[in-house]
């Protein structure tokens, strides 16, 4: 979820997000990603709008201000966890 | 869009509420089209690309449930323990009582003992199945109602731990109770059939009513086993007391009415009838009382320190 919030700071749509996540090394299923995007939109962490400019209309998601705030908190938690693990590993 | 995609999207839309259908349909179609396009660009046949793209999305029913937020389990981990505890309590208290009640009702009517017991067992089994079904249905419904589901019934708290039963004592009482009941029944049957003078009045014996006593003994043994293996709580103690009460009432009524003891036996032994009757009545009442009180004591001892 954190990865989605971070990547979508720049607007993106479903399939492209799937490809980006896979290229970054996150193994994710399409059938979990699409409902997740929808749930995040319902919770107000993403805002969505339909883009009809190109040949195929696509639904674009972008991280909302609430989403950015949550992403910051989660990133900080992640860093704390990371330092804890590194300390454990280096101590042993 | 070709028909395979149409069929897939239609299947996914089945479980989704009306107002979201349009949006989900459009988004899903565009995502599938994107996936197909990427595969076609790497020189794949369009039809095969479509099949692969849909296969990657997986079971449309599962996708639909994820979109709609429906749980894919009957009863979730949050409610499961409450469910099993309730089911266990109900089955170990209600079903034995139903069995005894059905046997009593059957013996009051006509029919061979075997037939009556068979029917009573059938009734008890039906009751057990009904209890299991309705409890499961209610819990499955609560799982799907967010307002009811999320109301926390109460955190578990170390004060709720049952006392550690001194296993040896419980096993001893289980074995003791079971063997006493069995020995008494065997003794009764043997004396009745092979003794010089039958103790129980022949009318009662032949009508098969005494099998009810056997049923009571069997249920008593059953309760002991339940207490040993499954755990004994206040509900079980209450059921036990109810059964004790039924036994006492029947026992007193049968004895005081002069139906129990054989007159020939009394004259042979030379005991005055009134004294013997009162002794048996008091014994029966004391036995039932002792058993019920014991049940409650055991239940309360296991509750809190």
Image: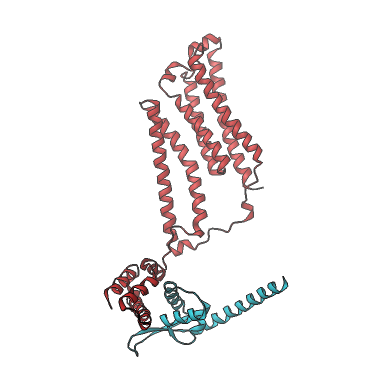
Q: Residue at x 64, y 53 (%)?
A: B159
Residue B30 in the figure: left or right of residue A40: left
Q: Which quadrant of the rendered structure holds the N terminus of chain B?
A: bottom left
Q: Is residue B24 above or below residue B248?
A: below
Chain shown cyan: that is A
Q: Is residue B89 above or below residue B247?
A: below
Residue B286 showing in the rendered view: no
Q: Colour of chain B?
A: red
Residue lying farthest to the bottom in this orientation: A53
Residue lying farthest to the left in this orientation: B3
Q: Residue at x 50, y 36 (%)?
A: B242
Residue B305 in the figure: left or right of residue B51: right
Q: Is residue B42 above or below residue B279?
A: below
Q: Which corner quadrant of the image does residue B291 belong to?
A: top right
What x and y, as percent, mark residue A61?
Answer: 43, 83
Which residue is more in the foreground, B261 or B74?
B74
Q: Residue at x 41, y 42 (%)?
A: B127
Q: Residue at x 32, y 78 (%)?
A: B45
What x and y, as percent, mark residue B227?
Answer: 56, 40
Which residue is more in the foreground, B213 or B167?
B167
Residue B250 showing in the rendered view: yes
Which residue is more in the foreground, B266 or B192?
B192
Residue A31 in the figure: left or right of residue A89: left
What x and y, as percent, mark residue B64?
Answer: 37, 69
């Amino acid at each position: 979820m954190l990865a989605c919030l971070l990547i979508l700071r720049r607007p993106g749509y479903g399939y492209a997000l799937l490809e980006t996540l896979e290229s970054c090394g996150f193994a994710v299923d399409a059938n979990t990603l699409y409902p997740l995007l929808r749930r995040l939109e319902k919770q107000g962490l993403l805002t969505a709008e339909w883009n009809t400019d190109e040949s195929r209309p696509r639904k674009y998601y972008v991280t909302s201000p609430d989403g950015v705030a949550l992403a910051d908190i989660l990133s900080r938690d992640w860093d704390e966890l990371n330092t804890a693990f590194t300390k454990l590993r280096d101590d042993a | 869009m070709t028909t395979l995609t149409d069929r897939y999207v239609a299947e996914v839309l089945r479980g989704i509420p009306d107002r979201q259908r349009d949006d989900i349909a459009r988004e899903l179609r565009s995502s599938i089209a994107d996936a197909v396009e990427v595969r076609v660009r790497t020189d794949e046949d369009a039809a095969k690309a479509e099949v692969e793209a849909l296969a990657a999305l997986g079971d449309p029913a599962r996708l639909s449930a994820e979109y709609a937020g429906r749980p894919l389990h009957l009863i979730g981990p949050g409610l499961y323990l409450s469910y099993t505890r309730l089911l266990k309590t109900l089955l170990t208290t209600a079903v034995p009582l139903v069995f005894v009640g059905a046997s009593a009702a059957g013996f009051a009517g006509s029919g061979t003992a075997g037939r009556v017991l068979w029917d009573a067992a059938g009734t008890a089994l039906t009751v057990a199945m009904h209890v299991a079904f309705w409890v499961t249905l209610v819990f499955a419904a609560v799982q799907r109602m967010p307002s009811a589901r999320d109301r926390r019934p109460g955190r578990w708290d170390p004060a709720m731990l049952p006392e550690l039963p001194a296993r040896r004592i419980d096993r001893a009482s289980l074995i003791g109770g079971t063997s006493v009941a069995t020995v008494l029944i065997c003794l009764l049957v043997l004396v009745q059939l092979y003794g010089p003078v039958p103790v129980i009045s022949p009318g009662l014996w032949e009508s098969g009513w005494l099998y009810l006593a056997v049923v009571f003994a069997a249920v008593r043994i059953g309760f002991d086993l339940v207490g040993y293996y499954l755990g004994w709580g206040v509900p079980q103690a209450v059921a036990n007391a109810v059964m004790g009460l039924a036994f006492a009432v029947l026992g007193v009524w049968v004895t005081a009415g002069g139906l129990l003891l054989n007159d020939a036996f009394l004259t042979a032994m030379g005991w005055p009838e009134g004294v013997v009757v009162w002794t048996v009545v008091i014994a029966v009442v004391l036995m039932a009382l002792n058993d019920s009180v014991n049940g409650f004591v055991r239940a309360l001892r296991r509750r809190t320190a």
